[in-house]
Amino acid sequence: MNRRHNHLLLVGEIMEKKFKVELITAESEASRFVRHRRLIRFPQLTMPMLAAYTPPNWEVTHTDEIVQQVNFDKKIDVVGITANTPAAPHAYRLAAEFRKRGVTVVIGGPHATLLPQEVQRYADAVVVGEGELVWPQLLADYEKGELRPLYSSCQLPDLQDMPRPRWDLIKGRVYGKGVTIATRGCPYACEYCTIPAMYQRKMRYRPISSIVEELRHMPGRALIFWDDNIGANRAYAKELFKAITPFKRWWTSQTTSDAAFDDEFMELAAKSGCKALFLGLETISQQSLNSANKQHNNVEKYKEILRRFHYYGIAVQAGTVFGFDHDDRSIFRTTVEFYREIGLDSATISVLIPFPNTPLFRKLEAEGRILSYDWEKYNGKKDVVYQPALMSPEELLMGMEWAARQFYSVPSIVERMWKSRTGLWWNLIRNLGYHLALRNFGNVGYNPELPANGNPVKQARTP
Ligand code: B12
Ligand code: SF4
């Protein structure tokens, strides 16, 4: 085929596109404010993936609010919005603007899956759960003028023929494009997590050959598997790691900490280019883990887990949550001390969020402890939305802010990097990125163990 022929094909394709859909990755104002200033940012896969499932007679555009502004005056037929819970109120405002302009609004994602009846008030159609099978159906219904208010997949997509995500729709200078998934779902059911509701606790696996084929076309060297638990099925994971080794990618993903004790898993992961894994360590209180139905984490083994990860040259990013019912005012200090002792590479530090319709939310609501139903406050960083058991909401928030600053203080970074000695050059950059981001927000937070008059600045950070 010559260039002219290609050109004619392209013109033909464009002329065939009868409908226009804009896909929006919605972000709350607070999240845009915080994440725009971060050195390290990751693109979400949702909309590039949905775009790949969009029928060819639809022209697709995408706006990711972390890096772009929504243009309400674009000439489109349908807008599809994805929103997590803290972004939901903002997504409703976007929806209202589009509806004013006569655009049909479809909302999906975690919040729509958890609370479809609420979301229906703001959208012409709501998608509950996974979109692969229902999205093309929904658009076909729109074309016939038969759009329904609610779409929910009767069948779970098996991911056997997953097309390549539309990486070309990922914009923004600091974004890498190498994002995909290998598996979907997680076999566990932690009390506070929304994954069991979203994916119905049914693990799905892509054929490894299809991931290999995708890697041949994926731009860049860095790769993120946005899986919830890439090590959920070790046998599958090991085959995957063997197959991707020749691509020499630097990759990261999430798994549970018990993977550390499977030497073959660790060795193959390291050989295939795994540089870091996100582990939901959550807390150093075993009682809290047990009551959150997360008994698969064993605090006594955390030190050994870190030693093993470092032995294989894989850094650990620990999901860390404060505010479980067994957390008292000492939890902030003891956690930072422990993380320094074990040489933890980095941590995502938040307060507990009782996402609507999770077992945790239902429990707290039954106990009369939910303080706010303003979903924007379900951000884990700026607000506490429930009454903690052993401290005040303010102490929880300020303790979390204090712990984050202690963890990312220069002496702590030096001590942890010295003990970890894993991927120093990028690990250091990552830590300094967090350090600078926190410094931008000022000296917020205090250790609630200390008497109030010894406390530094108490105000919550802006905005
Ligand atoms: C990538 C990611 C991030 C990135 C964000 C990148 C970015 N640029 O926004 C980072 C690491 C920064 C992050 C941060 C946070 N995240 Co996050 N994140 C994810 C993760 C792991 C993957 C998202 C993804 O790309 N999935 C792959 C796509 C293909 O799947 P999907 O989004 O589920 O989409 C499918 C369906 O849901 C549906 N669908 C979704 N939207 C729409 C829209 C339409 C129109 C249609 C038709 C269908 C549809 O179709 C898709 C195909 O089936 C998810 C977990 C997950 N498995 O999704 C958590 C998740 C979305 N995050 C979550 C949370 C809690 C957070 C934080 C609040 C954590 C914190 N305390 O700081 C922050 C919030 C930051 C923010 N954005 O406001 C929760 C959300 C829970 C909730 N109820 O809202 C999730 C579900 C994880 C969990 N364990 O519960 N996150
Ligand atoms: S292990 Fe992680 S992804 Fe799985 S249910 Fe628990 S918190 Fe959610």
Image: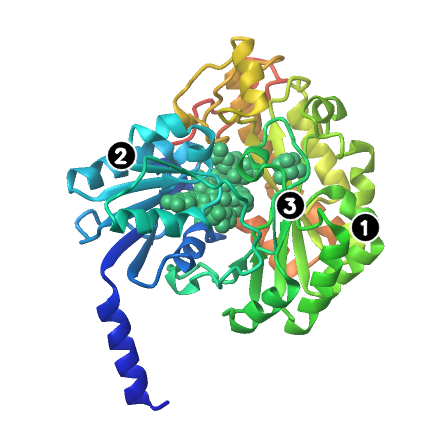
Residue at x-position 32% and y-position 50% = 139
Residue in front for this viewpoint, 205 or 262: 205
Residue type, numbered disc 3: Met
Mark nearest the camera among 3 and 1 is 3
Residue 439 visible in this rendered orientation of the protein: no
Mark found first going from the N terminus, 1 or 2: 2
Q: Is mark 2 within 8 Å of ligand 1?
A: no
CA separation, marks 1 and 2? 47 Å
Mark 1 or 2: in front is 2
Residue 203: give its label.
Answer: 3
Label 2: few (<14), some (14–19) or many (≥20) C-alpha neighbours in 10 Å: few
- Rounded to the nearest angstrom, the CA distance separating label 3 from label 2 is 34 Å
Residue at 15% x, 42% y is: 101
Q: Which residue is mark 1?
A: 308
> Which callout, 3 or 2, points at the residue further toward the start of the chain?
2
- Secondary element at tag 3: loop
Say if mark 1 contacts mark 2, CB within 8 Å: no
Q: Residue furthest top?
A: 368
> Residue 187 lies in what quarter of the image?
top right
Disc 2 secondary structure class: helix
Q: Position of residue 439 (x, y in %)?
A: 48, 40
Q: Is residue 253 visible?
A: yes
Amino acid carrying mark 1 in the image: Arg
The one of 251 and 127 positioned closer to us in this rendering = 127
Looking at the picture, which amino acid does disc 2 mark?
Answer: Arg
Residue 324: image x %, image y %? 63, 22
Residue topped by disc 2: 93
Q: Position of residue 309 (x, y in %)?
A: 76, 51
Element class at badge 1: helix
